[in-house]
Amino acid sequence: MQYKNIAVFCGSKNGNTSIFVEHARQLGVLMAAAGMNLVYGGGNVGLMGTIANAVLDNGGKVVGIIPKILVEQERQHLGLTELKVVDDMHTRKKMMYELCDAAIVLPGGNGTMDELFEMLTWNNLRIHNKKIILLNSAGYYHALIAHLQNMQHHGFLYENWDSTLHYFATPTEVIAFLGEDKN
């Protein structure tokens, strides 16, 4: 399998739409069934906890990476295959990028956007060339996609953004894309 270790960036909260939690759970089940390992932020709350528990409950492996400052806030998950406690957020992101073959971005807040845009920037700078996928649950990322199109239209992007960033409406489509993709 080309994509074995998948980083998932998502909220440490559930959001206010039940489909976010359901999609996180479905994605975890599908990842475990496909033999994909989860690499994520190490928390046991919000969408982070939901996807980690779904992968674990279905026989999958989960590596969590959490900075010391968030151990209390995100309540580190104590049942993971492996939990790495690191010094800071930058180390967390860098380690997640290094350990993954591709990344999936679920709904989330500022931290999730930071992780998404850093990965996009690193792809653009050729620091890495990993697939990045938005799980556009209930149209959560419609406005962001429109903004990226606007950035492209106004000439602020060096390459066509959708050659690196892909988006799908369901977890099934995401896993099918990773299973079919040969690039």
Image (spheres, rainbow, N blue to C red):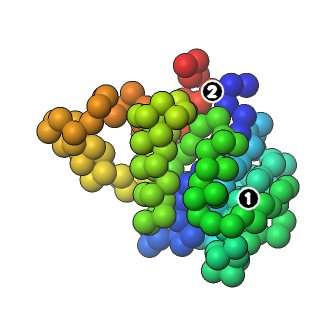
Q: Residues within 10 Å of mark 1 (few under 14, many from 20)?
A: many
Q: Quadrant of the N terminus?
A: top right
* SS for callout 1: strand
Q: Residues within 10 Å of mark 2 (few under 14, many from 20)?
A: few
Q: Percent position (x, y) of residue 68?
A: 70, 73
- Image quadrant in which you'd find residue 130: top right
Residue 20's disc is: none
Measured along the vertical axis of the image, is residue 113 above or below residue 32?
below
Image marks 1 and 2: residues in contact by CB distance under 8 Å: no
Farthest residue, direction left: 154
Q: Amino acid at mark 2?
A: Gly
Residue at mark 2: 179
Q: Nearer the viewer, mark 1 or mark 2?
A: 1
Is 170 placed left or right of 182 in the picture?
left
Q: Percent position (x, y) of residue 116?
A: 46, 50
Q: Which residue is at the front of the view, 169 or 145?
A: 145
- Residue at image x 59%, y 30%? 178
Q: Percent position (x, y) of residue 140?
A: 37, 56
- Residue at image x 77%, y 52%? 62
Q: Quadrant of the C terminus?
A: top right
Residue at mark 1: 64
- Residue at image x 83%, y 57%? 82
Measured along the vertical axis of the image, is residue 4 above or below residue 79?
above
